[in-house]
Each structure stands twice: as structure tokens, then as C-alpha cells.
Image: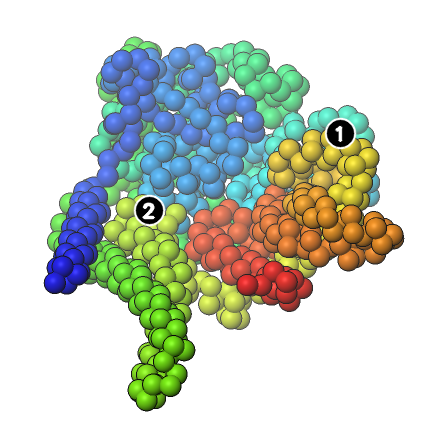
Amino acid sequence: MKSRTASMGRGLDGIRRLVRGIIAVLILAATAFTAAATPSSAQADETKGNDGNLKTLRIGFPSSGSNWAGGALGVAVAKGYLDEYLKPLGYKAQTTGFVGAAPALHEALASGDLDYVNYAGFAGILGKSKGVDTTLLGVTAYNSGWRLVASTASGIRKLSDLKGKKIAYQRGAAPQMYMIKVLKEAGLKFSDVEAVNASLPDGLSTLASNGVDAAVTNAGQEQQLVNEGKARVLHIGKDADRKTYYEPTVLVANRTFNKKHPDVSAAILQAMLKAKDDIVADHEAYIKLSSQKSGNPLNVVRATEVDDAKTGYPMSLSSSLIDSMKSVQQFELDNSLISRSIDIVDWTDPKPLRTAIAEYRQQTLGESKTKARAAADKAVSGVVQAASASAEASKSRNGRIFVTVVLPILVYVLASLLIVLGRRRVIRKIDALERHEEKAIAHRDETESDPSARKDSEASDDSASYRGALLNLRKILTALFALILPVGILVAWHTVSAAQLVSSLIMPSISSVGKTIVAELAGPNGTFVGDVAISVSRILKGYALALVFGLLFGVLMGMSLNVHRFFMLTFKAFRQIPMMAWVPLLVMWFGIGEGSKVAVIFLAAFFPILVNTIDGISRTDPHLVEVGRMYQFSRWRMFREVYLPSALPSIFVGLKLALGISWMAVVGAEMIAASSGIGFRINDARSLMDYSIVFAGMIVIAVAGVIMDAVLSLIAHISTPWTRK
């Protein structure tokens, strides 16, 4: 009776735990629903600055390493104009340079970490087309800061010599547009050269090591190589046809924030208008300021600067500049960089610029209201603002949210509880049966002469059958138990995307990623099979080298104290250097071809194999070593029959660790400078903001890695039978 009561108590406790779990799920779902149903506001409203009640306004821009924005924005920051105009509105400016340029800026905009961005119109159009919710406020600069530089070792002396050559450029950004236009001028097509996607600094460093034949650079960056006689400038965008090569730089705002705070947008534009006047009034002073802030020599800054500051820093939305933006968009469409066009005019909001110009000219220049307004209207002449759109009709999302968000969570949690509790119960029943069978066997041994032994035997057969069924059920539940976490990740992913907790731009849906995987693996235009094959080939080459040298040094250092002392300090020092720190150097030394990738993988995989081999050798039973010495084993026989069997399990641990690190190494290397491989494909997709391909590539890498790890585990299982239980 007591046992039954206790059992019932345990059952009630289980029910209480289940109910509490369901309540927790409902609370979680309600929280997710609330977050999904509540419109997000710009984070600048909630972020306090260092000056008491001033809120921080976050402005991003592309950077080559220094936190100098250049142009009107740079001057506005350096001279305090931004804070001058923003402080009365309760804000202070925080400007941040992004080395990753357009992709990093778009990700920051999409995640709500930036309120404004000043960057190339090329990038602004690409981002808007891909779904980044921005508003165009004005064109802040108009110039071409690009140059095409060739290595003197390449033998390239004129543009037509580029055919068949390897050219580094930054994909998905203005340098790509510049390079294609230069090739067109030379009578060449994009397919006539081997284009390598690399950041501007990486492209230049690879050019210095002759890893590529030519590279698109930011004007002035190539000067040192030119002075050393290692490179020659083939084309200067600034000195070429303006209509063809000049491109707009634009100021864009988070659309929601600009709609809510047009006065803040106008204040930023006023500060930049004041900065522009300073640039025009004393251009030489601006050049010196740029040199000071950027760290570039004066001659380099002069080489990049526009000839006419009024043209170079228009602070306008004129018809000609809007036409230039349309031309940039057409280029992106023609070269399949974007798949859908946007209405440039609808993208703009001329009101902040019109307000900024009118107020600035009245307050600073002392112009009449009529004259100031006329100047403001002229500056936005290229924009015919459509009638304000009607307010979006609100509709209930409750039913959809419940079906797509709450219900999957509930199903997942309940299923997980059933699997966990069911598996635990089955294991307990199996343990109980095993104890019962042990008692039955002992009892049967004591009563073998008893006539009832036959009945006990039949009961034992039934028990064995029941136990077999329970064992099969345990296997099934154990397999399901291992799937709880992966399925949970998928449910969390689905919840985030379905509830629109983050932008679909940076968190695509599971269905879109699944379609991408199918298309890239089996579709007629899919590239994943070839990309993975290339990456696996590189891994096998680097891994094989690491295996040979890692085992060799590991065995020698494990078996000889002197060898260990000689090498260990150096290896330990090299081991502390992060893998990715080697990549730029290896790219310079070996170029962007196979050599640099294999070298990166070798360095990454070598140390796990080395360390685990040493550890396995050093853990060999001293008594076995002593026995080998007693029988006067040779070094080879001692290694083969004593050390190796003992060290093999540890060696295989090192091999498995090295394999995982090899995948990280090859993807990292392919992302920095490559023209093939799965890492290159992911980086290429990020440049063009195709995040479904990024996610799909990551999943393919994970699956390929798991398969290779499973193969290695099978080899380890076969090779070490003595370790099996």
C-alpha cells in the first residue's frame, strides 16, 4: 500500500512538472507574440549617451582602417558641427568606420545598430534592393576614388594586356563596377579575366607578392608599390570620363527612424552643409585635415581629391545626380548584382534636405526666406515626391502567430518531454527486468529438481521477449533523444523568422534556405557540389601534410626528452598565434592559389595532431615500456608494439580535432582571398546580400564535416578493437 501511494505521489509530481513546463512554454510563446506584435523603434531613442540625457545617434561609414569618414561627414565630426546641430534636439553623434564596408554596414542597418550610413550609392542601391529598409536623404559626394594597378612582374603595360590575367577586386561594391567599366574601355569582358574577390587591403598585399597580376585599389594605397618599382598604375578613375566613372556617395537613414525624426535628419544635413562650405572655402586646409586624420601622406590625399570641391561635394538631389543613381542601378541589373529594381525617386525623402538647406542659408548666410527656399527647391529638383502613402491598414496577426509560432513550440516541448520521460521509464524497466532475471536464474539453480521449473522457464522466455521489445524501444527513444537539440534549434530558427523578431534579410526562413540547398546541389546552376569538392580537396592536401609531420614530431618528442625540449618552446609559441592571423602572410607568400590554402590548413591541423600524439606516447604504461626494454626491443619494435597501441586512441582524438579545425581554416582562407571553394561562395553571397546562400553553405559544411568525422570515427573503431567495451 505504501509502495502504491509512493508511486502515485511520483506520478503526481511528474504531472506537476509537465504542467509547469507547459505553463513556461505558454509564457515564452506569449512573450514571443508580444515581441512580434509590437513594432520596433529605432534604438537611438533608447540609448543614452555619455552626456547626461543626450541620446546617441549612430552613423556608420566605410573605413580602410582609420576612423576618418572623409568628405563633409568627416569635417562635420572633426569640427564638432554634428554635435552643434544635434545637441539642441537631445542627441550626440557617434560615428563608426566599418572595415567590412558595405556588407557589414548593411548588417548593422538591418539589425538596428546604425541609424544613418554615408557610403557609395552603389552599395545603397544594392542594400535597398535586397530589403534593407533605408531612405535616401542626399548625395554627399561625387567622384571616383579607384585605380587599376598592375604588378610590374606581370608584364602588363596597357589595359588590353589584362586579358587572361588574375585581377583582385571587391565584389558587390563600387570597385566591381569600376573594374567592369575599365575592362569595357579596353574592349574586354568580365569573363576575359580571372577575377578574385578580395578586400582592397588583401588585394593590394596579394599584388605585392605577385599572387595576382592586377588589383583595384583605393587611390593612393598603391603609391608605395609604385615608388618601389613593383607596380604601375594603368587607369585612374578620377582622371577618366566623369559621366562614365564618377559615382555618387549617399547619406541614407533607417527609414523608421527618419520617418519618426525628420528634424534629426535635417540637423545632420545642416552640419554636413556647413562642413561642405568649409571644404569649398579652403580646400588645401581640408586636404591637410584629411592627411592628419587618416594618416595618409599629403601627396596621397591630393591624388584622391576632386578637382572641383563644389562638384565633388554636392549635398544635393539634383536631376543629374538622380540620373547618375539610376545609371548605377542599371549597371547592377545588367550584371546580375541585383534581381529587382527600386524606384530611386520613391526611395528618397527630400524634406530633410530641403529643410536643412533653407534653414542653413537663412541662419548662416543671412538670405531671405524666399531665396533660401528657392535654393532648397533647386537642390532637390531631381525628386518629384509622390503623395504620401496612406497609412498601412492594420490587420490581426493573432491567428497566424499562434499557428506559426506558438503551436510549433508547444508541440516541440511536449514531444521532448515525452521522449525524455519515456526513455527514462524504459531504462528503469529494463534495469528492473535484469535484476528480476538475475534473481530468477539464481532461484532456478537452487530448485532444478523442482517440477515447476518448466513453468519458470516459460515465464523466463516471455520475460526475455518483453525485454527485447524494451531494448528496441530504448534504441528508438535514444535516437529521438539525440535529435531534441537539433530540432530545438530548428524550432527556435522558425520562431524567430516566423515571428519576424529579426529582419528576414539576415535571418531567412527555413523553407528559403532549404530551397537554396536543393537548387545549389541539384539545380542546373548550382555550384555547391563543385565548391565542396574543391574545399575537400584542399583539406585533404593540408590534412595529409599535417598528419605526416604531426605524427612524426609527436612520436619523436614523445619518445625522446631531448627532442621534446628542443622543439617544444618554438611549437608552443607558434601554437598561440591565431589561425586567421597567418592568412594574410600566407596569401602574400604563396599567392591566392592552392599553396596558401593548403598552408593554412596544415598550420591549423598540425598542432592538434602533434599535441595529442605526444600526450598518447607519454601516457604509455611504464611497465610495458620496461618489459620491452627487458626483451631488448629495437626503437621501431618498441614504437610498433608498445607505444603505438597505447597512443592510438589519443592520436585519433587529435585527428578528429584537426579535421574540424581544417574546415574552419579552409573556409576562413577562402573567404579572405579566393576564386573558388565553399568559403568563397559564402563570402561572395554575403557581398551580394544573398543570406539564404550563406545559411545553405554553412549547413552543407556542417553535413560534409559530420560525414568526414563519421568516416574517421569508423577507421578509429576498426583500428583500436581493444578499446571497445
| Circle 1 SS class | helix
Answer with the quarter of the image where residue 536 lies: bottom right
N-term mark: 1 or 2: 1
Q: Looking at the figure, which quarter contains the N terminus?
A: bottom left
Residue 640 vs residue 355, the one in the foreground? 640
Using residue 725 as the reference point, say whether residue 566 is left or right of it: right
The answer to whether residue 496 shows anywhere in this view is: yes
Position in image of residue 652 (x %, y %): 64, 55
Query: What residue sits right under mark 2 in the picture?
Result: 503
Residue drawn where x is 52% and y is 67% of the image: 521
Position in image of residue 632 (x %, y %): 87, 52
- Which numbered mark, 1 or 2, is in the foreground of this view? 2
What is the C-alpha distance between the residues marked 1 and 2?
Answer: 45 Å
Q: Looking at the figure, which quarter contains the C terminus?
A: bottom right
Residue 26 vs residue 65, the one in the foreground? 26
Q: Amino acid at mark 2?
A: Ser
Q: Amino acid at mark 1?
A: Val
Q: Is residue 145 above or below residue 286?
A: below
The answer to whether residue 376 shows anywhere in this view is: no
Answer with the quarter of the image where residue 344 lies: top left
Position in image of residue 442 (x %, y %): 39, 73
Q: Is residue 399 above or below residue 237?
A: below
Query: What residue sits right under mark 1 in the picture?
Result: 226
Q: Which numbered dot is residue 320?
A: none
So how many labels did they put on this image? 2
Using residue 121 as the reference point, say whether residue 152 is left or right of it: right
Residue 443 vs residue 104, the one in the foreground? 443
| Circle 2 SS class | loop
Using residue 632 as the reference point, say whether residue 539 is left or right of it: left
